[in-house]
Structures are given as structure tokens and as C-alpha cells.
Image (tube, rainbow, N blue to C red):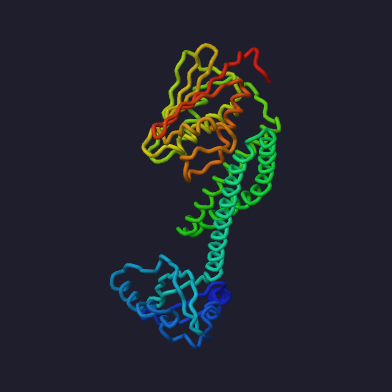
């Protein structure tokens, strides 16, 4: 008796709804939580078919579910659980997770349904989707604003380049833009990145394709904006004289192979980066960070301006006291009339179309190479590809600069 009383107390005070029905689907018991969910008094539903608590078409098909299970033994919900909808007394419909178990009691079968209300979860999910959509719009708006600003700077560059004084004005304009970009984009970038992580975490609880689609868009936009911001910050550090090479001896082959693996991950479909080293030695003594930035920028451009199903050649060679790095692609190439401006900040060739970029990458590469007393050369033909060559004197490890 004491056990029965305890069991009754547990059922009566359970947070989730609990309903029992017989083999014909007739409600035998219903606990207070279930009554509150469906807005019925026990006397209003006990003795009625449980389909009265279901919206159509589930209510029309429920008896068929029971009969099919009793005939075939194959459960539709029993022992499995699933998300369904319930019909309240006032006619409103709400979502809940239903788990059903079968119990043999006094020579007959009783089915017990455990009902967990999902209304709050669904509302939170809807708000999450709205928030995701809002973040996406924010990223798109920031991207449009940035493109307009860069376009305005390119136009201003052409207008003020007629005299040395106007060139100085352009330099000041660029510096102000760098400061603005750093301030205006750092905070929203951090917010968007954090939100994407949180959305991903919530999505793992209930796999929703639409949420993942928005997550992907937000992350891609964040990556693009972050790349642009990094270019601006690199330029600012260069102009402020904050970049000084730190020479460290290292194995150029291992160094280049790691970069190849890293860049292959972001290559287009069936794009292959083919690395090869020539020369009897493989030791270099340069600033690894600056050199890596140069190589990643050049390979990134090769990926960006080449199509799918293409090869990108990445070669290193040590000859005497010189390290030569060559990156060659068969992409869109650089128009002859644009080649003399190629290393100017904010300049982009006229055939780049809608391909994203700041026009800062090659300017930064040139300046990084110069800091290590290196040189950069290139050759290019429209629609036939481009080849960039970096040449550096290999510092003697005993006389390196620190």
C-alpha cells in the first residue's frame, strides 16, 4: 500500500503529463500536469478516446495505429518516442514530445504516454532563427558599406595622384580609413563570431537544416570581413614602422609543405597545389611569419583568380646564398595596362570583376619582402596565368639580425 501511495504521489506531482489508455484507446487516468496542458478536468476526458486530445489527421488515424501495432507488433510510437502535436480544449494546438510504453497489468495491456511540452523550446528556436537572420543582414550591410568605402577610396586615389601633395592626402586618407575599419568592424566581427558559435551549439541539440544554412553564411561573411580587416591592420603596422623582421633558421621544405597542406584546404573544387623543392640544401634564415604571409597571399591569389580543375605550382629553390620562391597559376592573368600599378595599395586590376579583395595584398607582400631585403617579380598574360617570384638572400645563421 505504501508503494502504491508513493507511486501515485510521484505521478500526481510529475512535471510532465502522464496519460494511460486501454487497448481501445480509451483514457483511464490523467495526471494534473496533463490536465493543465490540455486544459481539461479529469472527468472531462476519462472514458473518452485519447484521439480527442489530437488535431486532425492524427485524431482520425490513432485507432488505426493501435490496431496495426496489435496485429503486426511493429510500433509506430510505442517504445520509440517522437514529436507530435496536441489539441487543447480551447482548440489551440501545441507541440510536445511523446513517449509511449506498454504495460501488462492484470491480464490486459495498458499504454502509458509521457508528455513533455515543447512550446518554450519551439518559441526559443523561432527567436533563434530570427536572430540568425538579423545577423546575416547585419553582415551583408557591413559588407556593402565596406565595398562602397573601398570603391570611394579607389576613386579618390585616381583624383589625388596628380601631385605629391595630393599623394600625401591619399596617404592620410588611407590611414584614417585603417583606423575607422579597425574600430567599426572589430566589435561586430567578435559579436557575429560568438553568435555563430552559440547558434552552432544550440543547433546540435536539434538538427535544423535552416539554422545550419544561416550559420554557414554568417561564418563565411565573418571570414571575408576578417581577411579584409587583417589586411588593413597589416598596412597600418607597416606604415607605423612597427614591423621588424626576426631571423630564425628553419627547414624551408618542411615550412613550405605545411603551407601547402594549409592552403589546399581552402582551394576550389579539384584545384591542386603542387609543391616542389630544388637545390642541395633546405636551410634558410629568414622571418618565418613575414615569409609565410607573403607565400599565403600569393597562393591565395592563385586560388582566387584560377578556376576549378586547375594546378597551382609552388616551387622553392636554394642556389648559393639565395632562396627563390615561385607561385605559378593558369588563371585570369593581369591586363598589360594594369601591371605597372599592381603593387600600389588599394589597386585592383580591371578584370577582377566581383572577386572580393582589398587591393592591399601585393602591396603588403612587396613591403614584407623588402624588409627581408628580398625582391618580387612577376610575369602575366590575360587568360594564360600569372607567375610570381620572390628572391631572398639567405642570412648566414652566425650573422643573422635579431
Relative to 384, does residue 40 appear above or below in the rendering?
Answer: below
Which residue does the image show at 70% across and 35% down from the upper left? 165
Q: Quadrant of the C terminus?
A: top right
Relative to 228, does residue 275 appear above or below in the rendering?
Answer: above
The part of the image, by quadrant, that contains residue 229 is top right
**Residue at the outermost bottom position:** 43
Q: Quadrant of the N terminus?
A: bottom right
How many numbered circles does the render carry?
Answer: 0
| Lateral position of residue 247 relative to residue 61, left or right | right
The part of the image, by quadrant, that contains residue 311 is top left
Would residue 230 be seen by someone viewing this image from the given angle?
A: no
Q: Position of residue 124 (x, y in %)?
A: 56, 65
**Residue at the outermost front position:** 162
**Residue at the outermost left position:** 71
- Of 37 and 323, nearer the camera is 323
Q: Position of residue 320 (x, y in %)?
A: 52, 11
- Of 158 and 291, nearer the camera is 158
Would residue 333 be seen by someone viewing this image from the given angle?
A: yes
| Lateral position of residue 56 relative to residue 122, left or right | left
Q: Position of residue 16 (x, y in %)?
A: 54, 72
Relative to 110, does residue 236 appear above or below in the rendering?
Answer: above
Q: Position of residue 84 (x, y in %)?
A: 44, 71
| Lateral position of residue 397 relative to residue 296, left or right | right
Amino acid at each position: 500500500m505504501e508503494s502504491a501511495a508513493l507511486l501515485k504521489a510521484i505521478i500526481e506531482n510529475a512535471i510532465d503529463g502522464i496519460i494511460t489508455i486501454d487497448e481501445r484507446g480509451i483514457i483511464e487516468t490523467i495526471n494534473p500536469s496533463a490536465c493543465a496542458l490540455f486544459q481539461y478536468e479529469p472527468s472531462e476526458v476519462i472514458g473518452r478516446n485519447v484521439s480527442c486530445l489530437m488535431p486532425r489527421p492524427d485524431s482520425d488515424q490513432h485507432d488505426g495505429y493501435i490496431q496495426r501495432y496489435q496485429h503486426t507488433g511493429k510500433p509506430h510510437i510505442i517504445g520509440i518516442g517522437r514529436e507530435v502535436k496536441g489539441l487543447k480544449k480551447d482548440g489551440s494546438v501545441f507541440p510536445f514530445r511523446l513517449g509511449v510504453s506498454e504495460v501488462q497489468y492484470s491480464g490486459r495491456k495498458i499504454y502509458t504516454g509521457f508528455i513533455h511540452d515543447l512550446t518554450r523550446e519551439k518559441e526559443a528556436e523561432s527567436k533563434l532563427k530570427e536572430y540568425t537572420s538579423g545577423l546575416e543582414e547585419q553582415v551583408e550591410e557591413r559588407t556593402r558599406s565596406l565595398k562602397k568605402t573601398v570603391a570611394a577610396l579607389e576613386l579618390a586615389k585616381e583624383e589625388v595622384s596628380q601631385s605629391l601633395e595630393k599623394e600625401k592626402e591619399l596617404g592620410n586618407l588611407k590611414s584614417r580609413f585603417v583606423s575607422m575599419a579597425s574600430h567599426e568592424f572589430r566589435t561586430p566581427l567578435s559579436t557575429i563570431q560568438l553568435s555563430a558559435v552559440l547558434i552552432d551549439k544550440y543547433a546540435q541539440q536539434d538538427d535544423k537544416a535552416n539554422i545550419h544554412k544561416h550559420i554557414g553564411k554568417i561564418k563565411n561573411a565573418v571570414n571575408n570581413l576578417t581577411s579584409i580587416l587583417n589586411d588593413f591592420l597589416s598596412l597600418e603596422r607597416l606604415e607605423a614602422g612597427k614591423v621588424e623582421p626576426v631571423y630564425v633558421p628553419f627547414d624551408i621544405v618542411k615550412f613550405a609543405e605545411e603551407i601547402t597542406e594549409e592552403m589546399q584546404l581552402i582551394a576550389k573544387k579539384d584545384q591542386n597545389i603542387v609543391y616542389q623543392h630544388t637545390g642541395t640544401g633546405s636551410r634558410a634564415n629568414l622571418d618565418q611569419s613575414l615569409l609565410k604571409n607573403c607565400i599565403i597571399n600569393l597562393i591565395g591569389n592563385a586560388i582566387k583568380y584560377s578556376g576549378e580543375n586547375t594546378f597551382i605550382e609552388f616551387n622553392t629553390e636554394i642556389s648559393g646564398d639565395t632562396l627563390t620562391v615561385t607561385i605559378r597559376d593558369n588563371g585570369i592573368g593581369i591586363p598589360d595596362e594594369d601591371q605597372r600599378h599592381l603593387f600600389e595599395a588599394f589597386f585592383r586590376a580591371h578584370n577582377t570583376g566581383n572577386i572580393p579583395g582589398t587591393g592591399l595584398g601585393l602591396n603588403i607582400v612587396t613591403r614584407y619582402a623588402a624588409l627581408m631585403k628580398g625582391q618580387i617579380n612577376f610575369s602575366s598574360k590575360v587568360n594564360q596565368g600569372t607567375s610570381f617570384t620572390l628572391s631572398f638572400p639567405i642570412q648566414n645563421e652566425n650573422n643573422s639580425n635579431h
